[in-house]
Structures are given as structure tokens and as C-alpha cells.
């Protein structure tokens, strides 16, 4: 692809060095919910053949199978429920709320309580071109692990925890067996992750980022499984999944913007000159994208817009370097970013003669709506963040309290009310548990504040006593007010008998 072709269609094809980067936003996020994330994770972990494009059709097929068996007064071999009872199980007992714009549509959407539900429910779209949300979770595990062996161990532990075994509660075991009788294939079995990239060990040193925090928190969540029912535990897992997924995507946007800042400076002869400068410039030592109690979406929109501008700039520069026969590698580490900056500095005059700066300005002006997240990739990122973090807006009034693991809630009942950072009780329970994992002795609410900061949520521990978070902690019995503790509040472990299963 030439630079001229890129100018005509800047979003269609990325440069191979950019596309294959371990820090590229791949897969690109679109609409999802916490249940879509978990359902897709089931499929990537252990349901071979249950791809995203097959789910809507399988949902229609299972409804037809139920009607077929009901008309013949039969049920499949191994099934306990008759067709009418199984239909009620899917469309009433396990029903997951539809969005207001889906209220008139008929499709199967159930709570992903056990793996077999993901065979026919939980795709991002009702059409056949849904994005693989589970692959994003898999990428996060690899990026958050020290090396491939640690990532594979985490993947195995997650598979074992999501499997329905004899230690699960009786309803979960019944449900898995019953759905297998009605939808027998594919069976649950470990799949290879097919993931290779982990962050460079030098770049990881002393670096705190959402994927690393998530990989560690998975061990805490898995350890809590024996302390509760399957439904309670999957809700806990979903709460951590949804915060980590959006935090990781936003962190990736920041990495792109910082990388482009380095390369843009290199065009003028600046930019990092050694590996330490490159690491400091590319990887932020602190990361924040949400402030507790404040409006959430404007800040995320700014980061998505910066990511899109960086994507244009990096791809244009890489295609331009190809025109001067300057070969390079990738963008997966600080060292590779440094190498790219060196190549840009060596060829700055040639790139200027091509009119790279003017071309980028022209493309940016033409693609203003996309860069402002009004359409295309940026709009998809915003939709992903809003629906994953935000409390589910159910079409049915009966199910409006269904979602309790949210990170964002509406300030007011109107459709135009802003989304603010305010966590639901399940999310608070999950994060208090994860923040206390491995701790010995009492810990103040500052520990929770530090844990939230690893995911990019800023909350001053001194404000917790008087804000909504402190009120929720008291209501849930997760704190003790103590005049001897810092800020006067000590965290109470919600599951004190659990033991960490991953280092």
C-alpha cells in the first residue's frame, strides 16, 4: 500500500508493523456488556466451534428445537425438563434484560451462568459479524503476565474455575447438564490460547498498568469461588472484567498517543534518544481516566480521539518510511519505538519533502467526524466503554435492578442525564476483596484507593468517609469506623477464608 492510497483510505488498511504490534488495539472494541465479555470468554476458553458468528443462529435453532419437541410431546435424551419448562427456564428464569431498543426483538439472551449458555447466547450483535470480545480478555491476561508461562498458568486456572464441577452448587450442575441435553455441542474442553505477546520485561519493571492489576486480581476472584454460589461468583468476576477491559482499552489509547508524541517530535529532530527516555515517554508511571463522583465520558472521549490521531500519524509515518526504503520492525516495546524514532530522525528531510506533515493535516481535517468520535472506530470505543461500565438500562421495569456490578451510574432518571463514576454494590464487594488479597493485618480505605488507582480510577481516601463510596461500604458492612485507623475507616474482608491461587 502506498502513501497516496493511505491518504485516500486512512482507516481501511494499517501498516503491517502497526497491525502486528502487541500494543495495537486488537481486537478493536465495539458494543459489549459484561455478560457479552463473559460469554465470549467461555467460547475462547473451552467451546471449540462456538464462534461469535454462529451464536445468533444457534439461539434461533434452540427455540425451534423446543417448539419441535413440544409439538411431539417429547424431550431430548438426558433432559429432565419438558419443553414448556425448558422454554420458561430460558425466557424467564435465566432471562437477561434487553435494552430499550431491543424490546420488540425476539431472541435468546440468558445470564451466562454456566459455559453451555454461551453456545447460543451472549454475542455482541444479533447478526453474524460480532467482534470477539473474549479475545480482548485473553490479550489482557498475556499483557498483564510476566511471561508466557505465567500467562498460560492463569489461562488454565481461569478455565478450571469457569468449568462446572462437583464443587459447584446444585443449580449450576443441574443447569449445565440440562442445557447440554438440549444443546449438546460443542462440549466444554480446554482450548489453546493462541496468544504469544507479553510486554517486554524491561518495560514491565516498576510499571503499574490495568492488565497487570487484572491478571493478579483474577487469582483473588478465583480463590473466592468456594465462598459463594455460582451466580454470586460470576457476578463478582463480571464486575472485575468490565472495569479491567475498559481501563485496558483506555490505557492502550494513552500508549498510542504517547508513542505518536515521540515520533512526531522525532520528525523535528527531537524525541527519545536512549531506552530510558523511551520507556519514560511511552509508558506512563501513573494512569488515570476516571475520577470518583465526576462525569465519566468526556475524558474517555478525549483519549479515544487522541488514539485515532495517533493511529493516523503512526501509519502515515510507517508508509512514508517504506517509500524511502527504510525497513523497520514493530511497535511492541519501548526499544522498537526508539528504533522508529531513530529511523525518522535519519530520514526527516526525505519525509518533509514528501509533504508528510501537510498530508496528515489534510487527512485530519477530512476525517474530523471520525476523530471526534462521531462515527467509526471512535464511536465504537465510546459505545464499548459506556455499555461495559454503565449500569444496564433494562427495557423491562421488573429487571431494572438486575445489574449491580456497574462502575458508572446515571445522575438522574432522564435519558440525557450524565454518566458519573459511582460503583454498584457487587463491584465494590469485588474490588474490596481484591484489594485485601494477600494482606496481613488490618488495612484502611487507603488500600482500596490505591487499588482503584491501578485501574485508573482516582478517589482521595480522605474523601471516602463522606462520599457515596463510603456510604456504600458502610451499607455492605465492608468497613469499621476506627479513630485509630488512617481516615478512620478499616476495610473488612468480605471472604476471609479465601486463599490466593495465583502468585
Image (tube, helix red, strand yellow):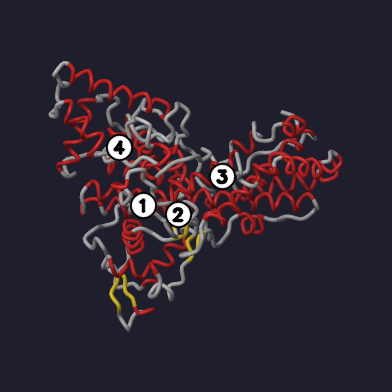
Please rate how many residues cluster around mark 2, counting C-alpha atoms within 10 Å: few if below 14, some from 14 to 19, many from 20: few
Between residue 373 and residue 455, name the one nearer to us: 373
| Front label number (3 vs 4) | 4
| Front label number (2 vs 1) | 2
- Report the residue marked by disc 3: 23
Relative to residue 245, is residue 86 depicted above or below? above
C-alpha gap between disc 3 and disc 4: 33 Å
- Report the residue marked by disc 2: 414
- Residue 110, label in figure: 4
- Report the residue marked by disc 1: 239
**In the rendered view of the protein, which quadrant contains the N terminus?**
top right
Pointer 4 with pointer 1, Cβ within 8 A: no
Between residue 464 and residue 19, name the one nearer to us: 464
C-alpha gap between disc 2 and disc 4: 27 Å
**Helix, strand or loop at mark 1:** helix
| Front label number (2 vs 4) | 2
C-alpha gap between disc 4 and disc 1: 17 Å
C-alpha gap between disc 2 and disc 1: 25 Å
Amino acid at each position: 500500500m502506498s502513501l497516496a492510497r493511505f491518504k485516500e483510505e486512512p482507516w481501511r488498511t494499517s501498516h503491517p508493523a502497526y497491525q502486528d504490534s502487541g500494543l495495537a488495539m486488537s481486537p478493536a472494541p465495539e458494543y459489549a456488556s459484561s455478560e457479552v465479555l463473559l460469554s465470549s470468554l467461555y467460547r475462547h476458553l473451552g467451546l471449540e466451534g462456538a464462534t461469535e458468528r454462529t451464536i445468533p443462529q444457534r439461539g434461533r435453532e434452540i427455540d425451534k428445537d423446543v417448539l419441535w419437541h413440544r409439538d411431539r410431546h417429547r424431550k431430548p435424551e438426558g433432559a429432565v425438563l419438558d419443553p414448556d419448562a425448558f422454554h420458561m427456564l430460558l425466557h424467564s428464569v435465566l432471562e437477561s434484560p434487553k435494552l430499550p431498543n431491543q424490546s420488540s426483538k425476539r431472541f435468546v439472551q440468558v445470564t451466562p451462568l454456566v459455559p453451555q449458555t454461551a453456545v447460543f447466547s451472549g454475542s455482541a450483535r444479533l447478526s453474524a459479524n460480532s467482534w470477539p470480545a473474549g479475545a480482548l480478555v485473553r490479550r489482557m491476561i498475556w499483557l498483564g503476565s510476566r511471561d508466557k508461562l505465567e500467562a498460560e498458568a492463569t489461562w488454565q486456572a481461569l478455565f478450571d474455575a469457569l468449568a462446572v464441577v462437583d464443587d459447584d452448587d446444585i443449580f449450576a450442575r443441574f443447569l449445565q447438564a440440562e442445557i447440554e441435553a438440549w444443546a449438546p455441542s460443542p462440549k466444554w474442553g480446554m482450548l489453546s490460547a493462541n496468544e504469544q505477546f507479553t510486554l517486554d520485561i524491561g518495560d514491565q519493571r516498576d510499571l503499574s498498568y490495568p492488565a497487570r492489576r487484572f491478571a493478579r486480581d483474577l487469582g483473588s476472584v478465583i480463590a473466592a469461588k468456594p465462598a459463594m454460589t455460582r451466580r454470586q461468583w460470576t457476578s463478582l468476576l463480571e464486575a472485575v472484567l468490565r472495569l479491567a477491559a475498559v481501563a485496558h482499552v483506555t490505557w492502550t489509547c494513552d500508549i498510542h498517543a504517547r508513542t505518536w508524541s515521540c515520533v512526531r517530535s522525532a520528525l523535528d529532530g527531537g524525541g527519545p534518544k536512549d531506552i530510558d527516555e523511551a520507556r519514560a515517554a511511552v509508558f506512563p508511571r501513573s494512569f488515570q481516566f476516571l475520577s470518583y463522583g465526576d462525569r465519566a465520558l468526556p475524558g474517555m472521549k478525549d483519549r479515544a480521539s487522541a488514539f485515532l490521531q495517533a493511529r493516523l500519524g503512526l501509519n502515515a509515518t510507517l508508509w512514508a518510511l517504506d517509500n524511502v526504503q527504510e525497513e523497520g520492525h514493530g511497535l511492541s516495546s519501548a526499544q522498537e519505538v526508539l528504533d522508529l524514532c531513530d529511523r525518522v530522525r535519519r530520514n526527516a528531510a526525505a519525509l518533509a519533502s514528501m509533504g508528510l506533515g501537510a498530508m496528515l493535516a489534510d487527512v485530519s481535517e477530512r476525517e474530523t467526524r471520525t476523530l471526534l468520535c462521531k462515527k467509526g472506530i471512535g464511536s465504537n470505543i465510546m459505545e464499548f466503554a459506556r455499555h461495559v461500565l454503565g449500569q444496564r438500562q433494562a427495557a423491562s421495569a421488573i429487571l431494572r435492578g438486575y445489574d449491580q456490578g456497574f462502575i458508572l451510574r446515571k445522575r438522574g432518571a432522564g435519558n440525557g442525564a450524565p454518566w458519573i463514576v459511582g460503583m454498584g454494590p457487587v463491584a465494590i464487594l469485588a474490588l474490596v476483596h481484591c484489594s485485601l488479597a494477600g494482606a496481613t493485618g488490618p488495612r484502611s480505605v487507603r488500600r482500596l484507593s490505591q487499588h482503584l488507582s491501578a485501574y485508573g480510577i482516582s478517589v482521595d481516601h480522605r474523601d471516602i468517609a463522606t462520599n457515596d463510596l463510603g456510604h456504600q461500604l458502610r451499607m455492605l458492612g465492608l468497613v469499621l469506623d476506627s479513630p485509630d485507623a488512617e481516615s478512620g475507616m478499616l476495610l473488612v474482608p468480605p471472604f476471609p477464608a479465601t486463599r490466593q491461587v495465583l502468585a
